[in-house]
Amino acid sequence: MQCCGQWKPVAAMVAVNFALAVTNFLVKKILDEGVSHIIILIYRQAISAVFLAPIAYFWERKSRPKLTARILCHLFLTALIGATLSQYFFLLGLEYTTATFSCAFINMVPAVTFMLALPFGLEKVDIRNKAGGAKVFGTLVCIAGAMVLTLYRGKTLVKSNSRATTHIINYANTMISTKKKERWAIGSILLTVGCIFWSSWFLLQARIGKTYPYQYSSTAFLSFFSAIQSAILSLVAERNFSKWILKGKLELITVTYAGMVASGLCYVGMSWCVKQKGPVFTSAFTPLVQIFVAMFDFFILHGQIYFGSVVGSILVVIGLYILLWGRNSEAEETNQRKQPQVEQEEDRNARSQV
């Protein structure tokens, strides 16, 4: 049972990143059809708030404490950084680039989160210890795999002979050569800013989880505040109200799925994992998004598998395994150190009762 409990956060983060990969894949399709990124953000956050509000009320109403002005300010700030700004810049960068290219930038999140967590004391590393060294080494291997996924393609290992592949490749080459529609430099800057905001959210969530450790309620408030913030932002960025109307079935399905699953359940799962294992552990799984997107590209769009994608994916998995081993070893060492203290306190209590 204890072993199953240790692997619950791992299974949760794999499921979360799979769901986020599906979201990125679907959102890119409706962005290419002309749907505004800020409108997608408003609808998905509003749907998330409506979806999570009754769940939070019935599930956490007995254990949830009263809201204070300080907690509300923290939740508002968390929504601004972790939902509104991070998703705004990411969706804007996704509009200028492609789904695979955008997911490659998410690979920077573990490194940025790790570097930000050290000065704030949210992550402690003792290089002289095996567990601490494994955490650092596993993070570096994961980052190396992410960089390979991002920067290196290599030879084609598996080709697709379908006509759809030829059409997609020709279409992609045409889109890349069109500078007006694919502004890669601007898109890269926007994606980088979005990744920094997302990394900051993991750290803020670690603080919020201590003062308000109720994932459904905090995520519902986060989505509610983010919907209001996005609506205010849309008045500046998007004044064409005709774009607020979603017309096709794919647009409705994508926005509903993104709201209920990506902005709703996925944020609940990430908040729970941050509470259980910390921000660095949770962010370390983000490179899995690109691996899943590459799988969708191959099996659904009949894309090609490159040598760099295989090597990068293997390095990411190895790095995650080493990081998980280091954290589990560190947790066991901490429990062994606390055990004598607990036994001494129990002996003192027994003697005082006698």
Image (cartoon, rainbow, N blue to C red):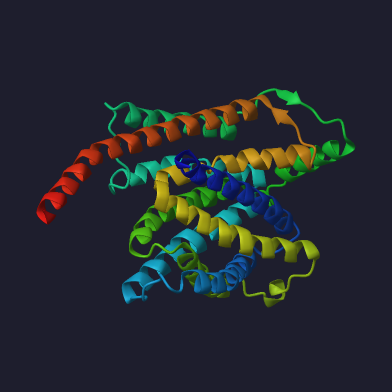
Query: Residue 151 at what x, y percent from top left?
Result: 57, 32
Question: Is residue 229 at least partly visible in the picture?
Answer: no
Q: Return the residue found at the far right.
A: 163
Q: Nearer the viewer, residue 139 or 150?
A: 139
Q: Nearer the viewer, residue 134 or 99?
A: 134
Instruction: Classify residue 326 by image quadrant.
Output: top left
The residue at 33%/26% (across/down) is: 130
Q: Residue furthest front?
A: 354
Q: How many marks?
A: 0
Q: Nearer the viewer, residue 147 or 46?
A: 46
242 to 151, vertically: above or below:
below
Residue 36 visible: yes
Q: Is residue 253 above or below residue 122?
A: below
65 left or right of 222 in image: left
The x and y percentages for residue 195 are 49, 49
| 39 shown above or below 158 | below
Is 348 displayed left or right of 17 in the figure? left
Image x and y of residue 179, in percent: 68, 47
Which residue is at the front of the view, 338 or 85? Answer: 338
| 23 to the left or right of 334 | right
> Image point 39% across, 62% down: which residue?
213
Provide residue 201's location: percent of width, then percent of height: 43, 56
Q: Say which residue appears at 62% left-offset and 64% top-offset.
A: 260
